[in-house]
Every structure is written in structure tokens, then in C-alpha cells.
Image: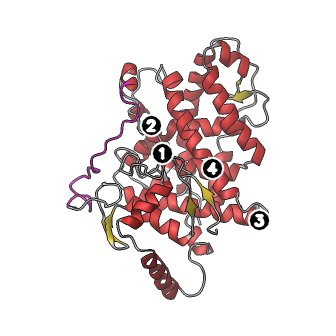
């Protein structure tokens, strides 16, 4: 990719880390569930003894990278920006706060802070040259070897594995109840989908639960939005049930319903987003190194980077006449994040899975069902 990409941060904020186990009234007072204090690692974690904080966002530093102490997230962000020669635009006054909680809000200001705190572009370039020297000729960013660890075909298969049942006629009952019932079914599908995503089941089971808990609402919304491309003014739920715009307005959820249609469904339809691209966007949401409670942050960050690289390579080779397709795809993520937060407030705090805590539900689903990746190759 060239430096001609002028775009606002594709991930304006990290996927949701709201505590879904809190009583319903509590979400109005704290909808983020995030803390600005440094990440707390268990005693056995290699970063547990770190005395330095990231010079960019204030999280716990993993060491000195490109000239300054920084965390894995800011290190990876700076490296990706320099290697791909990306440019960004700030929607505010070029003075956005960059801390642990808000570091993903504005990539322009984050990159400028990286530079102002002393990160060196030449250090990234020198590192890349050393890598080329060690591995021979070729661009390590786009070589088959660099991306084979995140096979794009497996991501597409994961999407195809959770296609809904045949469309059912619209139930004239309560729309909110219908959507919540569909969300319950979707949680089952979501766990199965995640198991098909390369390397997800290689993470500790506790981290698998944390990542699904952090991103389930956005993963659900992305899925039914894409599923609804062929429906006029309606969405297709995981049960195959179609909910039309008029019914949503009658139920009092018309505002958020319209946002789903205009910011997600129509955009996906306009660019003819395919299943592989949808799967990659959902995998980016899933592999969230900033999710509250993740212990293997570095591993998750690396997996997210691999999905970015795989998606960029896929769009470059599959849609060669659309050089701006990759950033255009990423620009759906901020809307997904914002709508996900609103959907939690509107719908999903109420009787999602009865009285079963979400953590226990996800853990049971992950443990009771074997991973399909154990029986099929991923490279």
C-alpha cells in the first residue's frame, strides 16, 4: 500500500469490554468498563515485573522499541504505519488525548505522539532490512510465508459454517424478544465460528472467553448486517427471521435499527463486501489485545496483525482495480463499535441467556465442543 491512503483511524476504539455480568442499571454509569491504569499481569507473566510505562499511552511497557519504552500495541501500530507508509487524518484539532483507554480513537494523533516521544522511523526500516537479509529476497510483509499462518480460506470457511437456516416468515410478536432470542442462538454460532478462526483455540481457554465476551455484540451485528444485504429495509436474524424497519420503529428501536441499515448494511451492499472480507473484519474485532482481562496480549496482537496483512493481500489480489478497498473495509469498524455499544443499551442486557452468566456459558461451549481446527490443516 502507498502513502496515499488518507483516512481516519479504522479502529476508532477497541471492541467492547463492558462487563456483561453487571446488573442492568449499572451500564448507564459506566459503559466502557475500561481502566486507564496499566495492565495488571499475573505473577508468571513475562511483563509482570516491568517497571516502565509506555511513553505513548501509559500502559505497561514490554521493553524499549524503536528508541523508546512502549507497549506491544503502540510498537505494532508504529511498525505497521512505517512499513506500509500509511497516512492518517484527525477529525478534531490534532490534539487528541492518547492514553491506554483512548489510544485507538485517533491514529493521526497516536502516530504524532510516537514521533514526538522519540520513536524512530529509520529503526523500523533497519529492522526490516535485517529481516530481509536473514530470510533472503522478497517482501516479508506480503510474502506467502508471512501470511500462510493466517490462511484466508479458513476464515472464509468459518463464515460459511454459520450461515443461517432458511428464512422464516416474520413473527408478529415482540420485536425485541425476537432479536434477543436470535442473539441467544447467535452465541452458539459465534463460539463455533471462533473455533474455525486460525489459532484462536491455541490461546488459553480463559483468553478465548475474554475475547468472545469483549466482542460478541460487534461480531453479532457484523454478521446479521452482511446477511441482510439482499433484504429491503430489514435485517435477517440468526434464526432466519426477518425483522423489517416498520416493525423495529413500532417496537421503539427504530433509531439504532436505521443506523444498522445506513452505516453497515447499505455500505456492505454498495461495495459488495464478500464473505472473506466479512470474516477478516470479524477476526480483527475478535483478536482484541486491549480486551479487559487478556493475559496473552502479545500473542493476540500478533494474530490481529496477521489478519490485517491477510486482508490487505486478499483485497490487493482479488480486487486489483480497487486500490482503496482495504481502508474502505476498515472504515466500517468505527460504526460497528458505536452501534455495538448502543445495541447493548437497547437490547442485550435483558434476558439474553436467562440467568446463566455469560462467562460460564462461553466456557461451557468452548470446553464441551472440540475444536474443528484440530482435525484440519491451517497452512
The CA distance from mark 1 to mark 4 is 19 Å
**Who comes first in sequence, dot 1 or dot 4?**
1
**Who comes first in sequence, dot 3 or dot 4?**
4
In the rendered structure, are the residues bearing label 1 and label 4 in contact, judged by CB atoms less than 8 Å apart?
A: no
Q: Residue at x 50, y 25 (%)?
A: 348
Tell me: 54 left or right of 254.
Answer: left
Instruction: Tell me the mark number nearer the camera, choosing from 1 and 4.
Output: 1
The CA distance from mark 4 to mark 2 is 20 Å
Could you say which is closer to the camera, residue 144 or residue 105?
105
Q: Which residue is mark 4?
A: 279
Figure check: 123 above or below 156 = below
Could you say which is closer to the camera, residue 358 or residue 48?
48
Identify the image quadrant of the C terminus: bottom right
**Mark 2: few/some/many CA within 10 Å (<14, 14-19, 20+):** many
Instruction: Considering the whole magenta stretch, tell me its main secondary structure.
Output: loop
In the rendered structure, are the residues bearing label 2 and label 1 in contact, judged by CB atoms less than 8 Å apart?
A: no
Instruction: Tell me the mark number nearer the camera, choosing from 2 and 1.
Output: 1
Instruction: Tell me the mark number nearer the camera, choosing from 3 and 1.
Output: 1
Q: Which residue is mark 1?
A: 13
Q: Which mark is residue 320?
A: 3
Residue 107 percent coordinates (x, y): 49, 55
Tell me: 372 left or right of 101.
Answer: right
Amino acid at each position: 500500500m502507498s502513502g496515499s491512503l488518507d483516512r481516519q483511524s479504522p479502529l476508532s476504539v477497541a471492541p467492547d469490554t463492558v462487563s456483561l455480568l453487571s446488573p442492568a442499571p449499572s451500564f448507564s454509569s459506566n459503559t466502557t468498563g475500561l481502566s486507564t491504569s496499566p495492565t495488571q499481569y499475573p505473577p508468571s507473566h513475562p511483563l509482570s515485573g516491568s517497571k516502565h510505562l509506555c511513553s505513548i499511552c501509559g500502559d505497561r511497557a514490554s521493553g524499549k522499541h524503536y528508541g523508546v519504552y512502549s507497549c506491544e500495541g503502540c510498537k505494532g501500530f508504529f511498525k505497521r504505519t512505517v512499513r506500509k507508509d500509511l497516512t492518517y487524518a484527525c477529525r478534531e484539532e490534532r490534539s487528541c488525548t492518547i492514553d491506554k483507554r483512548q489510544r485507538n480513537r485517533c491514529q493521526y494523533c497516536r502516530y504524532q505522539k510516537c514521533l514526538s516521544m522519540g520513536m524512530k522511523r529509520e529503526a523500523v526500516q533497519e529492522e526490516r532490512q535485517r529481516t530481509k537479509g536473514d530470510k533472503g529476497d522478497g517482501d516479508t510483509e506480503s510474502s506467502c510465508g508471512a501470511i500462510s499462518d493466517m490462511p484466508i480460506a479458513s476464515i472464509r470457511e468459518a463464515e460459511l459454517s454459520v450461515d443461517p437456516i432458511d428464512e422464516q416468515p416474520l413473527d408478529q410478536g415482540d420485536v425485541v424478544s425476537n432479536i434477543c432470542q436470535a442473539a441467544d442462538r447467535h452465541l452458539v454460532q459465534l463460539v463455533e465460528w471462533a473455533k474455525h478462526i486460525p489459532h484462536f483455540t491455541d490461546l488459553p481457554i480463559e483468553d478465548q472467553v475474554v475475547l468472545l465476551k469483549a466482542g460478541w455484540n460487534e461480531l453479532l451485528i457484523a454478521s446479521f448486517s452482511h446477511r441482510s444485504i439482499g433484504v429491503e429495509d430489514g435485517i435477517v436474524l440468526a434464526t432466519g427471521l426477518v425483522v423489517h424497519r416498520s416493525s423495529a420503529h413500532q417496537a421503539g428501536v427504530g433509531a439504532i435499527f436505521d443506523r444498522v441499515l445506513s452505516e453497515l448494511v447499505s455500505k456492505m451492499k454498495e461495495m459488495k463486501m464478500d464473505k472473506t472480507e466479512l470474516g477478516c473484519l470479524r477476526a480483527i474485532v475478535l483478536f482484541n489485545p486491549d480486551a479487559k482481562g487478556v493475559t496473552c496480549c502479545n500473542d493476540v496482537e500478533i494474530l490481529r496483525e496477521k489478519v490485517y496483512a491477510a486482508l490487505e493481500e486478499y483485497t490487493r489480489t482479488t480486487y486489483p482495480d480497487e486500490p482503496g478497498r482495504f481502508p474502505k473495509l476498515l472504515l466500517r469498524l468505527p460504526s460497528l463499535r458505536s452501534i455495538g455499544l448502543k445495541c447493548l443499551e437497547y437490547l442485550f442486557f435483558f434476558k439474553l441467556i436467562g440467568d446463566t452468566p455469560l462467562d460460564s456459558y462461553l466456557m461451557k461451549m468452548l470446553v464441551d465442543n472440540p475444536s474443528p481446527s484440530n482435525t484440519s490443516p491451517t497452512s
